[in-house]
Amino acid sequence: MKLSVLIPVHNEESTIEEVIRRVGAVDLDGIEREIVIVDDASTDGTPEKLEKYKDRPDLALLRHDANRGKGAAIRTGLASATGDIVIIQDADLEYDPSEYPKLIAPIVAGEAEVVFGSRFKGQAENMALPNLIANKILAWAATVLFFRRVTDEATCYKVFRADLLRSFDLECERFEFCPEVTAKTLKGGYSFVEVPIKYHARTVEAGKKIKVRDGFEALWTLIRYRFKH
């Protein structure tokens, strides 16, 4: 079995090397891994930082010529991924790759097809109040719309059987990746579990990119896919 770690990157020169180090250091107990990085037209020193990894055998480095968004970068990475399981990893240090083993375990054991790492079943540190409220609203909306309990819809740590994720025919371009795959997972009735994780939020000053409009877009995306035929 093989795990593909998809890392969309845009202007993360201060964290990307540490993220790569941490992803590569995880003990997966014999499961093969590949790292697929998509540089979404970074304009800082990220491309130069990534250049040193271009010959690493377990790492594929892809690049967009124009900035298209997180969802587009994930779709580009998924097209090149060769693993049986796919996990999404942000290029900052808010999420800890050491939690991969427990995140992939339900899929490896055949107990689930999709796993979300829930910050609200685990630890959510330093999360700004507006972000906390938005995350709670999105989780509530997903629960109400699809009649299945979700505690953390907007978590980055989403894990899928690769063939299932490809079958979703993703359309996302930006941060609406999360609500799109949440909607398609829940509406499709696929086996789904949440696993507690730790999370340490960074500030806008430190590079956090999510905006208020992304919250409204996420809510609309959940509603749109709930009633889309």
Image (tube, helix red, strand yellow):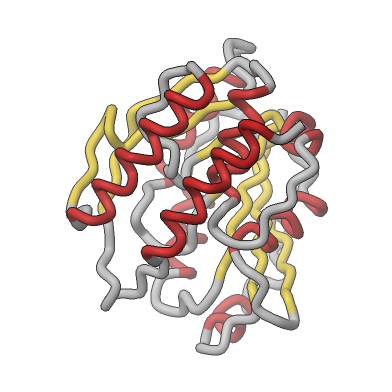
- Give left or right: position of 189 versus 138: right
Q: Image quarter for residue 42?
A: bottom right
Count of marks placed on residues: 0
Which quadrant, please, contains the N terminus?
Answer: top right
How far across and down, in percent of the image, does residue 97 sit? 44, 45
Front-most of residues 193 and 27 = 193
Q: Image quarter for residue 64?
A: bottom right
Residue positioned 39% across, 77% down in the render: 14
Q: Image quarter for residue 59?
A: bottom right
How far across and down, in percent of the image, does residue 181 sit? 62, 38
How far across and down, in percent of the image, does residue 121 sit? 28, 27
Residue positioned 74% across, 51% down in the render: 171
Q: In this view, does 38 lie above or below 28?
A: below
Which quadrant, please, contains the C terminus?
Answer: top right
Q: In this view, does 195 lie above or below 18?
A: above
Front-most of residues 169 and 212 = 212
- Give left or right: position of 208 versus 28: left
Q: Is residue 75 visible?
A: yes
How far across and down, in percent of the image, does residue 129 sit? 18, 54
Q: Can residue 108 be seen in this view?
A: no
Residue positioned 61% across, 48% down in the render: 5
Residue positioned 60% across, 76% down in the render: 50
